Amino acid sequence: MVGYLYRAKVVMQSYELPTRVASCATGKYMGLNFGLVKEVNDAEVVIRELVQDSAGLWTERISRIQLQE
């Protein structure tokens, strides 16, 4: 995560990809593990992901992406 901005009263986060900078807002999906953006604030983005464990069962995981300073 490299920043955040307000757009039409919606907080969006900006993140850096290898070739560009993109943005995402609460309720959108991002990442490879069906990551649903649950919260965006000035310090971090909270994402709920579904990942498969070693037994092949799907489990929910909460990930946090913090602002790089």
Image (cartoon, rainbow, N blue to C red):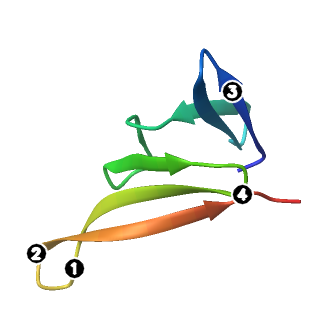
Is label 4 in contact with label 1 (beta carbons under 8 Å)?
Answer: no
Mark 3–mark 2 CB contact (< 8 Å): no
User: Which residue has dot 3 on it?
Assistant: 6
The residue carrying mark 1 is: 53
Which residue appears farthest toward the top when viewing the image? 8
Q: Write down the residue under mark 2.
A: 57
Compare marks 4 and 2 and give the one earlier in the sequence. 4
Residue 33: image x %, image y %?
A: 34, 56
Instruction: Looking at the picture, tell me which residue is in the foreground, 52 or 1.
Output: 1
Q: Position of residue 52 (x, y in %)?
A: 21, 71
Q: CA distance from mark 4 to mark 2?
A: 32 Å
> What is the secondary structure assignment of the residue under circle 2?
loop
Work out how far the residue at label 2 is from the one at label 1, CA to CA, in angstroms: 6 Å
Q: Residue at x 50, y 58 (%)?
A: 46
Picture quadrant where residue 17 is located: top right
| Pointer 4 local density, CA inside 10 Å: few below 14, some 14–19, many at least 20 | some
Return the disc, 4 or 1, that comes first in the chain's sequence.
4
Q: Secondary structure at mark 4?
A: loop
In the rendering, at what x and y percent does residue 34 appear?
31, 49
Please name the amino acid that badge 4 sits on: Ala
- Identify which amino acid the numbered label 2 is placed on: Leu
Left or right: where does residue 69 sit relative to residue 33?
right
Q: Nearer the viewer, mark 3 or mark 2?
A: 3
